[in-house]
Image (cartoon, rainbow, N blue to C red):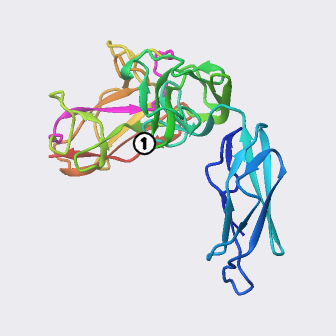
Amino acid sequence: MKLSGDTQATVIGRPFAQPIVVQLFDAAGRPISGATVTFAVTNGTAVLSANSAVTNANGQAQVSVTAGSTAGPITISVNAITRAVSFSLSAVPPGPIISRVSNAGSFVDGLVPCGLATIFGTNIAPNLNGSVTGNSFVGPYPTRLLNIQVDIAGRPAPIVSVSRINNEEQVTIQAPCELTAGPATLRMTIGEGSGTVAVRVLPVQPAVFETTDSANRKVAVIVRPNGTYMTLENPIVRGERVIGFFTGLGQTTIPSATNNPGAFNNSSQVAAQIVVGVNNEGVDFAPAIMAPGLVGIYIIPFDVPEATTPGTYRPFSIGAIGPDTVYVPSNASAIHIR
């Protein structure tokens, strides 16, 4: 039986991340040790670390595979005793392999016009350690960073950052404001290589930006009236009007252009209908706007009622109703109240 390593992809000339592993059992379900297993490339081009292997005490045998110089499907046939299986692998041209595209605040799959999105994949920045930002998280952002370009439906996307941390590669972008809801193609180009993925542009997909508090738990990013951030040691006082930070709220009533920050005259009001909840109850709030001086980030000043329940990690979330009249909740977050 196939144990692991099937349906992998890698760039031509590079090893696959996992070896292909098979396991043999006898009729009674006991592992067969000492059996010779043969491996052969029967389709495509690839190099095996060995053409045969002997099963260990657990009945397992494995070989490593390196993709050849030709892109396309690769089939590895495996034979042992009277059993035969095949592994389906794939070699792709040099360029990124995109695994998913998500909201940069909630990391739920999807993207929204003007909002921030994060692209995850491999072969994006394999030699990077850490993060590189475009203009230190204050726009306008470049449309090329570390030789990486992203376009969605043919429109260039400003690049906020490129990261490789704990071997996880990602690019955070602003989704172009001119996108319309519906299916689209996202293309990432790195030098001469490129990768594409089908995405769906959503009218709204609200997300609460979060940080990690001193107890190593996620809480919403909130600024109190005195200009300090809410923390476990600096909770919100009941009755205060505080400011939360969000993305995925969509276009503004006066349409915003890609890579343009929110205006300081509060003219960048969000077109969607917004709901703000504290302790699972709606609260009063000022209009949601694109954050003055920031790209792809929104703020909502809201009231924490004097009569609400105090405590740590109290429920906090928002919701939005876009032009399609569908209510979309944000990720469930938390705030500290005293």
Residue 245 is a magenta residue = yes
Residue at left 45%, top 14%?
A: 260
Residue at left 14%, top 28%?
A: 226
Residue at left 72%, top 33%?
A: 93
* Mark 1 residue crowding within 10 angstroms, few (<14) / some (14–19) / many (20+): many
Return the residue at label 1: 330
Give 279 or 86, whichever is nearer the viewer: 86
Disc 1 marks which amino acid? Ser
Using residue 81 as the reference point, say whether residue 141 is left or right of it.
Answer: left
Residue range of the region highlighted in magenta in the rendering: 235-258
Q: Which x, y percent locates residue 189?
A: 63, 25
Q: Which x, y percent locates residue 306?
A: 16, 43
Using residue 252 as the reference point, say whether residue 43 is left or right of it.
Answer: right
**Secondary structure of residue under mark 1:** loop
Q: Which x, y percent locates residue 282?
A: 32, 43
Instruction: Please tell me in which quadrant of the rendered image residue 186 appears.
Output: top right
Magenta stretch, main secondary structure, is: loop
Residue at left 49%, top 37%?
A: 103
Using residue 318 as the reference point, say whether residue 103 is left or right of it.
Answer: right
Compared to 308, does 151 lie above or below?
A: above
Q: Quadrant of the N terminus?
A: bottom right
Residue 231 is a magenta residue = no
Give 144 or 322, whichever is nearer the viewer: 144
Using residue 20 as the reference point, say whether residue 176 is left or right of it.
Answer: left
Q: Which x, y percent locates residue 205?
A: 49, 37
Give 174 or 324, whichever is nearer the viewer: 174
